[in-house]
Image (tube, rainbow, N blue to C red):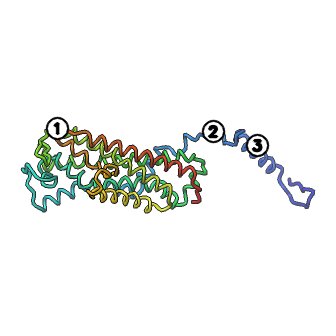
């Protein structure tokens, strides 16, 4: 049965009014005195597993990882088409690449270290926040709400995992391909030093760890650019351009000691590991330089994102 209100003959259902009243009371009960919804926990938002699965499903992630796997096979085809001497005991990295599996891994890391590896790290870190802005989804993510520091931290961790996976995948696939095509011989350095296969495995492991740490400065810079611009291409391209510029300046001998402060100056210090007498000084300087640069960039990224006006 419907009732008529005193203001003008609009009929309302008492049962419906009671239902709305009960719903309002329930909603009020779900909100705490601080305004937070009951059961809400910031540390349960944007979980790493969810974000990692989301990034793995993206086409750019699949293409990058696929190309990393494909690159060693491309190099093998290039050597098979061209002329190489697998018994060479001297020469540069290209000349020694087919001497053994360790030498092939060294070549793969060497030829990709100038552009490909920095680009991969810049892609994962530069795209992570800027892509959300370009899709106009960042403001909705923060409205869930996910705290800003958690958004930045979770995305940085996932980007770091994907970057490390790509950087580790390259030498692993290269080693497998090298063993099949070139065998498990000694690793030979351009200086003529010969390192056994077992010792070379340790050297390659340390080399991979060093490359991951050394490229941390690219990660920090790309993340800073990612929270500063709304175009992923600008963030990724900016980080890659800085890396290229640093490499160009490092070739100018007139800069003398100033080159030591460039973030790419010690990029290939890991080559010293393929030697019977290892010099650790350059690698130590490279690690220290990268950690300083990456720390500064990450702190600036956190400060910038915390104060940024999110409009998209």
What is the distance, in whole Å, between disc 3 and disc 1 at their CAs? 76 Å
Which residue position holds label 2? 39
Vertical relation: 94 (above or below) 147: below
Which residue position holds label 1? 277
Horizontal side of 275 relative to 264 (left or right) equals left
Residue 279: image x %, image y %? 22, 39
Residue 6: image x %, image y %? 93, 56
Looking at the image, tell me whether mark 3 or mark 2 is earlier in sequence order.
3
Q: Is mark 2 on a helix, strand or loop?
A: loop
Residue at 38% x, 43% y is 291
Looking at the image, tell me whether mark 3 or mark 1 is earlier in sequence order.
3
Q: Is mark 3 on a helix, strand or loop?
A: helix
Vertical relation: 25 (above or below) 222: above
| Most foreground residue, 85 or 22 | 85
- Front position among marks 3 and 2: 2
What is the distance, in whole Å, between disc 3 and disc 2 at their CAs? 17 Å
Residue 39 in view in this figure: yes
Residue 115 in view in this figure: no
Marks counted in the figure total 3
Which residue position holds label 3? 25
| Most foreground residue, 128 or 283 | 283
Density class for disc 3 (Cα within 10 Å; few <14, some 14-19, many ≥20) is few
| Most foreground residue, 248 or 6 | 248
* Residue 265 numbered tag: none
| Most foreground residue, 287 or 233 | 287
């Amino acid at each position: 049965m419907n009732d008529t209100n005193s203001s003008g003959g609009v009929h309302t259902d008492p049962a419906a009014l009671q239902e709305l009243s009960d719903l309002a009371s329930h909603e009020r009960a779900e909100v705490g005195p601080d305004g937070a919804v009951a059961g809400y926990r910031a540390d349960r938002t944007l979980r790493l597993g969810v974000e990692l699965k989301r990034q793995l499903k993206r086409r750019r992630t699949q293409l990058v990882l696929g190309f990393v796997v494909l690159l060693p096979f491309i190099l093998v085809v290039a050597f098979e088409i061209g002329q190489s001497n697998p018994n060479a005991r001297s020469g540069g990295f290209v000349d020694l690449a087919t001497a053994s599996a360790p030498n092939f891994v060294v070549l793969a890391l060497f030829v990709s270290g100038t552009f490909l590896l920095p680009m991969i790290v810049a892609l994962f870190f530069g795209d992570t926040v800027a892509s959300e802005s370009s899709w106009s989804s960042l403001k909705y993510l923060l409205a869930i709400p996910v705290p800003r520091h958690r958004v930045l931290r979770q995305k940085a961790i996932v980007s770091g995992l994907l970057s490390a996976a790509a950087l580790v995948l390259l030498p692993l696939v290269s080693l497998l391909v090298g063993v099949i095509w070139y065998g498990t011989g000694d690793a030979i350095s351009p200086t003529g030093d010969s390192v056994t296969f077992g010792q070379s495995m340790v050297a390659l492991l340390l080399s991979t760890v060093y490359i991951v740490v050394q490229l941390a400065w690219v990660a920090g810079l790309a993340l800073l650019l990612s929270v500063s611009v709304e175009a992923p291409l600008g963030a990724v391209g900016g980080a890659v351009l800085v890396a290229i510029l640093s490499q160009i300046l490092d070739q100018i001998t007139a800069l003398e000691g100033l080159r030591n402060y460039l973030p790419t100056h010690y990029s290939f210090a890991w080559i010293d590991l393929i030697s019977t007498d290892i010099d650790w000084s350059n690698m130590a300087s490279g690690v220290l330089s990268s950690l300083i640069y990456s720390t500064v960039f990450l702190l600036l990224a956190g400060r910038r994102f915390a104060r940024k006006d999110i409009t998209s």
